[in-house]
Amino acid sequence: MADMSDFQKQFLAKGVGNQLFTQKEFDDALSEAKAEIMAMAIEASRTAVMMEREYCAKLVDKMADEEEEGELCTAIRNVAEAIRNRIPSQRQQ
């Protein structure tokens, strides 16, 4: 606080004495902000999981491309599709 003037120190110490909002208004706004943050975090996590799932499926597809056509190749492709459809409602269209 050495960089502050005496006025600034006094203003911060005492404030202006005006209440800007009630405790209930503050609590309500804080709850809303927390809910928005949680919603964003959930969506970001969901997106990250979907991206990782898609990448894993592409790796399996690449493995299938390296195989000769046949039962093993078909089985590998089925694994890739199963990875993508792990939770069908989450699959991006």
Image (cartoon, rainbow, N blue to C red):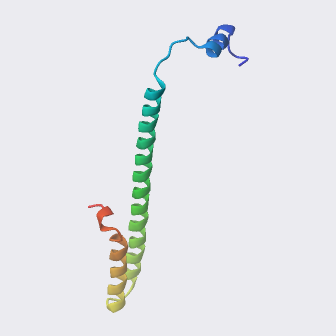
Task: Say how many tags the image has.
Answer: 0
Observer-nearest of 50 and 24: 24
Asked whether, in this view, residue 34 is left or right of residue 3, the answer is left
- Tell which of 78 and 43 is nearer to you: 43
User: For this view, does 90 lie left or right of residue 18?
Assistant: left
Residue 61, given in percent of the width and then of the height, sits at 37, 76
Residue occupying the point 42% across, 73% down: 59
Which corner quadrant holds the N terminus?
top right
Does 65 appear above or below 11?
below
Where residue 67 sits, quadrant-wise, is bottom left
Residue 13: name its quadrant: top right
Q: Is residue 26 above or below residue 86?
A: above
Residue appearing at x 36%, y 89% in the figure: 72
Task: Kindly give the residue lying farthest to the front in the view shown.
Answer: 24
Residue depicted at x 37% and y 83%: 76
Q: Quadrant of the C terminus?
A: bottom left
Residue 9 at x, y = what percent? 67, 13
Residue 78 location in percent, x, y? 33, 81
Q: Nearer the viewer, residue 87 or 66?
A: 87
Single out the residue that lies furthest toward the left: 93
